[in-house]
Amino acid sequence: MKKPRVMIPDWLLGGLLTVIVLLLFLLQFGPLETIEAKLYDLRTQLRQPTGASQKIAIVEIDDASVNQLGRYPWPRSRVAEGLDVIAEAGAKVVGLDILYPDPEQNPGLDALKAVEKLLEESSPALVGRPVSLPGLENEVEGQGQTTTNLKAQQTLQQILGSINQATQELDSDSRLADSIALTENTILPVYFTIGTPLGRSDAELPEKIVGNFLTQVENPENAAGATSVLQGIEMIPPLEPFVEAAHSLGHINIQTDGDGVLRSHLLLVDYEGQYFPSFATQIASAYLNLQPSDIRVRLGGGILLGKVFIPTDPQFKMLVSYDPPSWTAERNPTFPYYSFVDVLNQKVQEGAFKDKIVLVGVTLTGLGEQNVTPRSPRLPAVEVIANVIENILDQNFIVRPTWGQPTELALIILFGAFISFGVPRLSATKSAAITVILVVVLAGVAAYLFANQGLWIKVLYPGITLVLGYTVMVSKRYLLTEKEKEVLEVDSIETNKMLGLSFQGQGMLDMAFEKFRKCPVEDVKDLLYNLGLDFERKRMFNKAVSVYEHIAKADSKYKDLQSRMDRVRTAGETVIFGAGGGMKRGADATVMVDAGGSTASTLGRYEVLKELGRGAMGIVYLGKDPKINRTVAIKTLRLEEDDMEPAERDAVRVRFFREAESAGRLSHPNIVTIYDAGEDHDLSYIAMELLDGADLKDRCQKDKLMAPAETVELVAKVAGALDYAHQQGIVHRDIKPANIMILKDGSVKVTDFGIARITASSKTATGVVMGTPSYMSPEQLTGKKVDGRSDLFSLTVVLYELLTGQKPFEGDSMATLMYKIANEAPQPPTIYNESLSPEVVKIIYRGLEKDLEKRYQRGNEMAADLRKVVLPV
């Protein structure tokens, strides 16, 4: 007895999906959170930039500074000089984003101190008793009139003075400490090693560092349990003299998300139970004239900076609203950048730093810290700090609202109810439309709240509930309901026969075959055989084979089926006029021979021998004109494609014969000759001169370059041929190495005028882009009307490549390549071939001019210049 099928109710399946999504949401499932973060990044692009900052300026130690001032790191006295200039410019707050935890290593200063010690130890021999270096100097000055060796005293006095002066000049740490103190409101960075402390530190912190800890901590509704602040196990502060001279200190620790993107700023670090503020927080606080006692920490999330409330999560991480990076804003950067060397040389305009926050940081290539942010893959650390400060001062925050998570839970449940009870009762089309509308509304509202209100609502989990739920419910309906219907389409044999014959009579052979296949083969063998013959007559050999193979499945010995299939397959390998991917071809293709003898396939009056190659317009065959026994190349174009409209087919046919007309008017020793053009059934063809040689593609490889003199003469001949064609009103439009051939007798031929157009106004349309991108002229790329000067540009590209083995314009994408051709100068050819003469280089540069009026106007002019060049053979 057949067991009844167990059916899962739709409401239960929808409910299970909803519960699964809810669990993933509450557990913050890693892969989905990463996708949600990427959606967050997309929404950041919608936020409007705040415009040029009037409060913050950035002084960068960049490549230009190193190029002029020497290798980095510099002596700290040089940084001190820059701070002095910034202080004199009236900066209100200076943030020095460079951590100096250790004394500067200065061998010269150490040597001077050793000399000082030696002099102190030698003082009894000089003045009768040991004294310190200053005392020794005073003693020598006092004994100057009583000591017999006055000259030795004077020499010692000079040495002592020089040592004192050199010591002061070389003590960069003292110099920097003095500058920090002079600036008054200088904020210095501190770094914490993050981890879980096992105990307390042995070292006692200096009082100046202790004064930076935040003591005003609020605990609303006992929120301490919900607070989870990153903990530091070791503090790495600046040198003590720097600490004493600074206004305050802040940590520079960052914490990226799981995908390595820095989306938030860590406002606090917990060090031994006390909260240490961030570098950016301290700078903003100093700008607002606040002290650490004016900063209040609200456990559970949030910091009150004076009257400015900074929303955070329980870890005191603030979502950063990044402006577009300054290096992408060419005219109005958010944060003005100034090179350190310009500041040092006082080349900054007056008032640039007045009453502003000035951040000093390293952006040097290879040394400057770069961060991946939602709006930039490499944002300097100093600009990250600038964004955080700007967010705080302008109260430009991105917030996870308190009602965000409840709303997201409600949406998941609501959408779960829709897929459980709504989708099963609606048709697939209606439920799909409602699902799409709900997803669009959800995404639109979330994007609006994010872009205009700074409110971040997670959309992935509700969206997954909708899309996944709809997919599962509709798939279940199809697999379990639609499949059970088992609707079989059964047509009458006689009806299909009549329809097939009707289609065959109208020339719709494919549709006729479709109808015949629905009938038993035994009943329609004769009809199928005749259909195969019709396919043969239309030279659709691959389709004829399909018909014969269909007959052979039922009766492989029917008439001459096997021998006919063999002949048709041979024809398919020789003359492939049919469409489809099942066509065969081979290098050793032979002529199709009929059963009665040796009748070859023909096109018009030409016998087709074998295929030579395939191009953009069609297939090229080796053929023979039996009237004069001349071997020719036949280029074909199949116009009767299944997906081509009649009007389109007619337009292609007209264009084909127009190309034949234009090319047939050319008679030049360096241009391939066109003999004939015609049409055979549904095939158009052009018969042309058969060339015995090779194109220039191989000659463009560095290890196969021709001699420069041979190359120049070859290009001069091509230029002359193009000049002739241009005077006939014909532009080639696709000059490239593949369309220039060197024959075995040494002559040169320009081939494939198949895309040439008559340039008379009655036959030329602007806006047509034809050719190979690497060799196109700027005007051809932009779709402008072109003339012979466009061909000369392409020919110069070929000349450049034949001489150097490199193209003058290259890019890693089509867009980059087109931009370089249209806007950038070519690479000097002497980079790749130093033997090129200045005359050749001059010709290349003129031929590649963007300005049409500066380029060669005629091919003969270019050919004449080339033939004047003297090059080694």
Image (cartoon, rainbow, N blue to C red):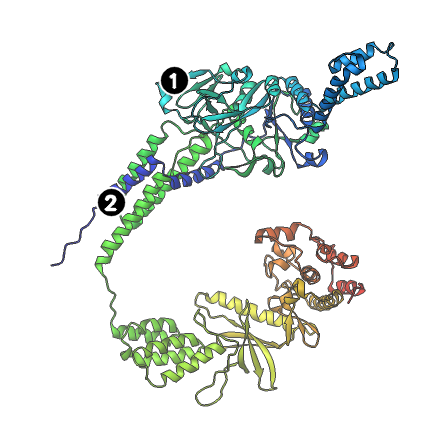
Q: Which image quarter: residue 329?
A: top right
Identify which residue, 706 or 57, lies in the foreground.
706
Q: Residues within 10 Å of mark 1 (few under 14, many from 20)?
A: few
* Whether residue 289 is visible: no
Question: The C terminus lies in which quarter of the figure?
Answer: bottom right
Q: Which residue is mark 1?
A: 219
Tell me the SS state at disc 2. Answer: helix
* Residues at marks 1 and 2, CA–CA distance in whole angstroms: 45 Å
How packed mark 2 is, by other alpha carbons closer than 10 Å (few <14, some 14-19, many 20 or more), is some
* Among the two numbered marks 1 and 2 on one chain, the one whose residue lies closer to the N terminus: 2
* Circle 2: residue type: Leu
Residue 314 position in % (x across, y down): 40, 26
Q: Which residue sits at x=71%, y=34%?
A: 70
Query: Between 110 and 28, which is closer to the camera in this rendering?
Result: 110
**Residue nearest the viewer, comparing 497 with 5:** 5
Front-lying residue, 273 or 269: 273
Q: Are marks 1 and 2 in contact (CB under 8 Å)?
A: no
Question: Comparing marks 1 and 2, which lies closer to the viewer?
Answer: 1
Q: Tag 1, which secondary structure?
A: loop
Label annotation for residue 13: 2
- 504 displayed left or right of 177: left
Mark 1 residue type: Asn
**Residue 434 position in % (x across, y down):** 32, 44
Quadrant (top left/top right/bottom left/bottom right) for the N terminus: bottom left
Say whether residue 777 is visible: yes
The quadrant holding residue 273 is top left
Instruction: Say above or below: 687 vs 442.
Output: below
